[in-house]
Amino acid sequence: MGRGGRAHPEHSGAAEKDHHAGREPDSALPTAPRLNREQKETCETDWSDKVEAYNIDETCARYHNQSTEVQFHPHSTTLEESASTPETWAKFTQENLCRAERERLASVHLRGLIDCILRDVAEDLRLQCDAVNLAYGRRCEQLEDARLKLEQHLHKTLREITDQEQNVAALKQAIKNKEMPLKVAQTRLYQRSHRPNVELCRDNVQFRLVSEVEELNMSLTALREKLLEAEQSLRNLEDTRMSLEKDIAVKTNSLFIDRQKCMTHRTRYPTILQLVGYQ
């Protein structure tokens, strides 16, 4: 059935499938989680060190001359070479905070970009879904219209078959009705051929009987030819009937698949919010 300019479910479905694979992932997606985890571990380590240092300083602040926990530590005045200065400590802390904030903002930007892509893809998919549903609707209308026309043609063919069967029966009866007079006329001729001697005369009765036999034979020949034509026409009509019934069954099955199976599944197509991941 017509192709030009008409949306076909298979073509629309293929386009719908392409939308699922048509988006390339952003290059930042694979590295963003790793960078966030690394910065998280760095901040947690810095926070843990600061909590520990705070607890130590808080303990030191509680020491006084009457404290029982204090004792001599002769070498405690020697600082390790790796010890930081207030400037390097503040710089280290600030750099950690800046890097953490930078990665956080990058993640926020990336999440916004991903949300936009997901919304665009979801909207495209919904639009394509609507196009596929429309194509299915048109296809079902075409199949329904074709099936209706085939059924009308089948009803007409069935009426013609009935008429032709009656015609065949009438021709057979007409042939049967002609055969008995032919037998009578031929029997009369046969019997008259046994007349003795000069009585075997070609009289007017003889000519009329011969003429009657010829007329009956011609009539029977014409009737038998019409019977053959009628029987062939009946066979052709029966072939047409079987072909129409087969085509109607195919159209009915196609409608069942498109309406009851395909369209039923498509009613469960996810909404835009579900496609984006919010539901």
Image (cartoon, grey):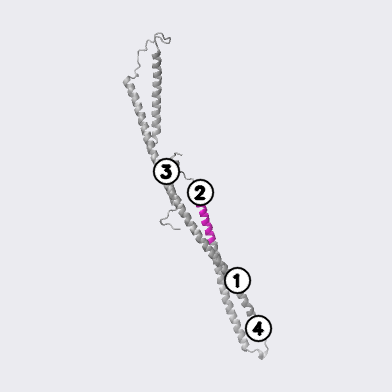
**Main structural element of the magenta stretch: helix, strand or loop?**
helix
Left or right for 271, reference 94: right
Q: Which residue is drawn at 61% across and 84% down?
A: 210
Judged by depth in the image, the label closer to the viewer, 4 or 2, is 2
Mark 3 Cα shell of 10 Å, populated few (<14), some (14-19), many (≥20): many
Image: 173 above or below 72: below
Residue at the image point whose x is 59% and y is 79% from the top: 217
Residue 169's mark? 1
Tag 1 secondary structure: helix
- Apparent side of residue 190 relative to residue 153 in the rendered image (left or right): right
Mark closer to the observer (1, 3):
3
212 lies above or below 4: below
* N-term mark: 4 or 2: 4
Q: Mark 2 points at which residue?
A: 264
Q: Is residue 135 magenta?
A: no
Front one among 231 and 168: 168
- Compare marks 3 and 4 and give the one earlier in the sequence: 3
